[in-house]
Amino acid sequence: MKVSYSAVVVTVFVFLSCNSSRSINPYSYTIQKTVVAGNGVVVSAHPLASQVGVSVLKKGGNAVDAGIAVQLALAVVYPGAGNIGGGGFMVAHLQDGKHIAIDYREAAPGAATRDMYLDSAGNPVTELSRRGHLSAGIPGTVAGLFASHRYGSLPFKELIQPAIELAEKGFAITASEAGTLNRLKSDFKKYNTAKTAFEKDTEWKTGDTLVQSELAETLRRIRDNGQKGFYEGETARLIVEEMKKRNGIITEEDLKNYMAKERTPVVFGYKGHTLISMPLPSSGGIIIEQCLKMIEEQNIEQMGFHSPGAVQLMIEVERRAYADRAEFMGDEDFHTVPVKELVSRSYLEKRMADFVPGKAGTSELVKAGLPAESEETTHISIADKWGNMVAITTTLNDHYGSRTIVAGAGFVLNDEMDDFSAKPGVPNMYGALGTEANAIVPGKRMLSSMTPTIVLKNNAPFLVVGTPGGTTIPTSVFQSIVNIIDFGLPPADAVNKPKFHHQWLPDEVFVEENFPAPTLDSLRAMGYTITLRGTIGRTELIKINKKDDSYVFEAVADSRGDDAAEGY
């Protein structure tokens, strides 16, 4: 078996016809970080999933078809975040000009209660909301796949078949995946009543084949019975049986009644561009709109990339946006959110009235907090030759979610209930506060930071972008967009250059370890607390250039992981 990696970011020029495609070999594959192509591109967290997506485009499928196939493939080859046991969001711009936002975020079960994760003294019990059966929300991914399929063109059975084969016949795992499976071995034993496909007697190593037979059977039931093949029948029975083993609360009614929802996307202008992003229950689209509008009149492009002035400005708009997130945002189906006010020019001008260049702001002036989120999501960016653009971000919340696998069905359950406020007004394990807006209510969808985003330039396709990273998602997407539009960085640099993050509380600027030292010294002199941390996000970005009546796609997969770009 061979899994090869690019030691540096290499641009691979791919102008292949449909008939000259290389076949997908699940036991020997390469990881391409940058691809330039003329017909269509896919960027995802795993090279096999990206290859599956491009194979769909070559068959004549559109970007939505490819997005469905990639999500299903990721459920097999990237089980720590790719999923059918979690949820997500899709934002799309179609060739006819239509904008789409589909919400398949997980929801609280009918038996959920506001204080379900508190002990007898009223203190949050972190393990209950983050591990095991009780931490799982009602999965939304499968409903989301079928809700989006109405915009596809190929039969669903064709789109799911590659995932079935990858699960049944297996694929070679990467070094990263082998390390993860070894680290989580004790958790798999602790939170499951039956041995899972992720466990074996010896250590996993690079190139080992992971076979998931039970997952293959679950995928076949979806193939043969549609959405009901997951939310009703045998799979639903297995989920409910699993719940009963250890005090889980998802019922047959919860599963049968779950629905994906089409939302009105966040759409706004910025310096000649149109941005399309996800609305609530994602906070991401609102945060992006707030941040971009707050810097729009500040001449940030003249300050320069990673200059102290530009970074300080971006820190301060992030601070203000995240304070608003904590105070106001939640599922609009259950809580009134003043969205129009939050993104209005007059309101944002007031928010920036106390901004002082060269002097650190302070979060003590704002009375709000921020619910914490895990960083283990995954993003997919796709563009096709017809002008369809798709941005999809999905999640299990923590890496391998609740660490609980449905016995007999072979898929990982999410631990998204931790994204609610376990106790409004009380700091959680990260020192962040929850609010009433995000309190647990049956049927409610927990607040998210996932920010799948599309950018048009002069009303033509320009960017598809998104990333995993929990609360760092909106700031990473914000910075990637500014890096290209304002600073003119090449796509690979916009993705891979070091990033930073501020989320109001804690009042610290988090930076990747390779961030420019002179800028950090200047920020410290202004009064900022700088905290070095590991990687921030894994951005998947496509830049689209119009050439005559066709497109040239530049696709970049983040160098921070096994992410891969494919095209033809």
Image: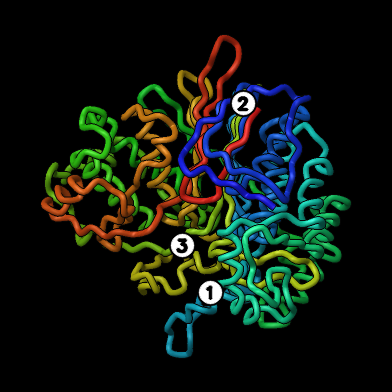
Helix, strand or loop at label 1? It is helix
Depth check, front residue: 358 or 91: 358
x then y, percent, for residue 235: 81, 65
257 on left or right of 7: right
Instruction: Identify the disc placed on residue 14.
Output: 2
Dot 2: within a 10 Å radius of its alpha carbon, few (fewer than 14), some, or many (20 or more) residues?
some
Q: Earlier in the sequence, mark 1 or mark 3?
A: 1
Q: Are marks 2 and 3 in contact (CB under 8 Å)?
A: no
Answer above or below: position of 180 versus 113.
above
Instruction: Identify the disc placed on residue 373.
Output: 3
How far is disc 1 from disc 2 in space, using C-alphas?
A: 46 Å
Instruction: Identify the disc placed on residue 558.
Output: none
Q: Which label sits in the foreground, 1 or 2?
A: 2
Seen at 54% across and 62% down, the residue is 397
x then y, percent, for residue 11: 51, 31
x then y, percent, for residue 220: 85, 55
> In the figure, residue 218 lies in which quadrant?
bottom right
x then y, percent, for residue 183: 55, 72
Q: Which residue is mark 1?
A: 129
